[in-house]
Image: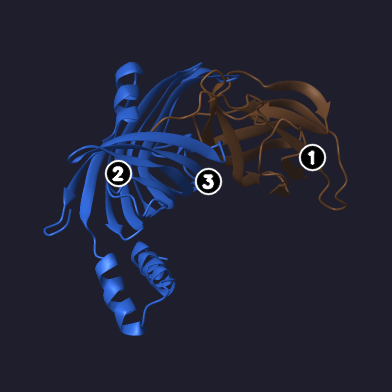
Chain colours: A brown, B blue
Amino acid sequence: MLSSCFEKGDCQNQTSNIIKVAFFNSTDGKSIELQLDSVKISGIPGKFIEDEELSAFVMPLNPVTDKSIITLYRAEGASNLTVQYRTRTTVLDPACGATELFTLENAEGSGIASVVITKDLVTVSLTTNLSVYF
Amino acid sequence: MSIFKLTGILVFVSASFVHGQNKKEITKDSLISFRPTGIRLGTDLVGIIKTGVTPGFSNQEFIADIDFHRYYLVAEAGRYSRDLSISNGDYANSGSYLRVGVDVNFLVKDPDKNMFFLGFRYGRARYDERVRYLTETEYGDQLKLSENSEVTSGWMELTTGLRIKVWKVLWMGYTGRLKFAPSTPSTTPVAPYDIPGYGLTFKQPWWGFSYYVMMRIPFQGQK
């Protein structure tokens, strides 16, 4: 079987491993700012964020695992978020190489009111993927 | 619809177009004219040549067809493998495929049974894919391995081509294909990139070309 000489795909990649985590008040649903002493993410050595007041932050997912554990340290105590996801490898073209599409599958936490996956597909458009309610 | 049902419908439709004879003669003639006269077996030269000249590529395809008057029941089976370097790793694919369908011959009165045809195929492939590549993220440079095991895909084709008798039982001919409607699973670890027998999944429609050398074995009492 012969195939056409035009075998190049489109290198435009809309996928990303960066998710956005945003904080909300559980009673009125409004965005809130939290004073974070530090944030640690499993697989990343050291503190990912240190001494900042934030209403949201962005963080990377690890492409070779299926889970990230995020620990938020505040004056009130520590909160844990566990995010489970799956990756799908995509080859767009030999020249573009392989990349991953991340899909968030489950999120749960402790030391928080609740956590909701608001956008499961992780793309370059940084809309909120995880809404965390305190 | 199974290929047997499709062939049956084609036989019925063709018989209904026979004119100028009484009912008894039509039945008798139809039975005779739709009796297969031989089977052709062959292989695709394009796959063999491409295997020889393309590093990391292998494709062997075999064809068989059998005539029912102007209709030919066709089966094409092949084995396929491909190793590819990508910018951040490598990709490998191996599997097999089968296409079945019907060709309609438009040179029915040719004494040598040469044919120009239009046809249809349904293709199905079963294959494995493996991608091994380097990811560069905030977690450091990591080697990732993603694999699909025994994935199945289907597609359809419109075909056209020629079959020419070269010498005694030796035949040659080509098939041009317009391939379309590939189906791939949506939850595999690797998004299917290349379907054996079809080609690159993001090419829709896609095209292909096969050049066959064939041997025709006539049935007993037929020429």
Q: Residue furthest toward the front?
A: B20
Label 2 vs label 1: CA separation?
57 Å
The residue at 85%/50% (across/down) is: A29
Q: Are marks 1 and 3 on the same chain?
A: no
Q: Secondary structure at mark 2?
A: strand
Give the percent coordinates (x, y) of residue A82. Answer: 60, 40
Disc number placed over residue A23 in the picture, else none? 1
Residue B150 seen in the current view: no
Q: Is residue A36 left or right of residue B53?
A: right
Q: Nearer the viewer, residue A125 or A54?
A: A125
**Pointer 1 with pointer 3, Cβ within 8 A:** no
Picture residue at 80% right of the left edge, 23% below the top: A52
- Answer with mark 2 or mark 3, whichever residue precedes in sequence: 2
Q: Is residue B112 left or right of residue A17?
A: left
Residue beneath label 3, please?
B180
Quarter containing the N terminus of chain B: bottom left
Q: Could you tell me residue B179's position as x and y percent?
A: 50, 43
Nearest-to-viewer mark from 1 and 3: 3
Q: Given the image, on which type of amino acid does mark 1 rest?
A: Phe
Is residue B197 placed above or below B48 in the rendered structure? Answer: below
Give the residue at mark 2: B77
Q: CA distance from mark 1 to mark 3?
A: 47 Å
Q: Disc 1 sits on a residue from what chain? A: A
Mark 3, Cα crowd under 10 Å, few <14 / some 14-19 / many 20+, is: some
